């Protein structure tokens, strides 16, 4: 994916299971407009893929960032 290639169905299912993300967030019909990914989802993906963080550390950071984001966002 980093090289501009698209995963096959099995690859997408494996990535979704590993990351805990919903595949519906990545599949769109031709009539849908391209939406910008949510910041928290992007941060979560980066944290979960960091080889220097344990699963527990990634979850702890996600929770901390989410709580801070919810408190500080403009539309809250």
Image (spheres, rainbow, N blue to C red):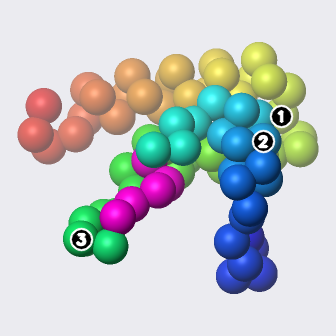
Q: What's the distance in space between the residues labelled 2 and 1, CA to CA?
A: 20 Å
Magenta residues, dominant SS class: loop
Residue that carries the numbered disc 3 in the rendered image: 31
Q: Quadrant of residue 44?
A: top right
Tell me: residue 42, above or below residue 36: above
Quadrant location of the N terminus in the rendered image = bottom right
Q: Are marks 1 and 3 in contact (CB under 8 Å)?
A: no
Q: Secondary structure at mark 2?
A: helix
Q: Which residues are magenta?
A: 25-29
- Tell me, for residue 72, which label it has, or none: none
Q: Is residue 53 magenta?
A: no
- Tell me, for residue 14, which label it has, or none: 2
Residue that carries the numbered disc 1 in the rendered image: 53
Q: Position of residue 75 (x, y in %)?
A: 10, 40
Q: Residue at x 29, y 28 (%)?
A: 70
Q: Quadrant of residue 71?
A: top left
Q: Secondary structure at mark 1?
A: loop
């Amino acid at each position: 994916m980093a090289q501009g290639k698209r995963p096959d169905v099995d690859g997408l299912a494996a990535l979704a299971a590993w990351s805990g993300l919903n595949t519906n967030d990545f599949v769109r019909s031709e009539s849908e407009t391209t939406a910008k990914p949510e910041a928290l989802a992007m941060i979560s993906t980066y944290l979960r893929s960091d080889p220097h963080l344990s699963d527990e550390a990634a979850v702890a950071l996600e929770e901390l960032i989410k709580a801070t984001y919810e408190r500080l966002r403009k539309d809250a």
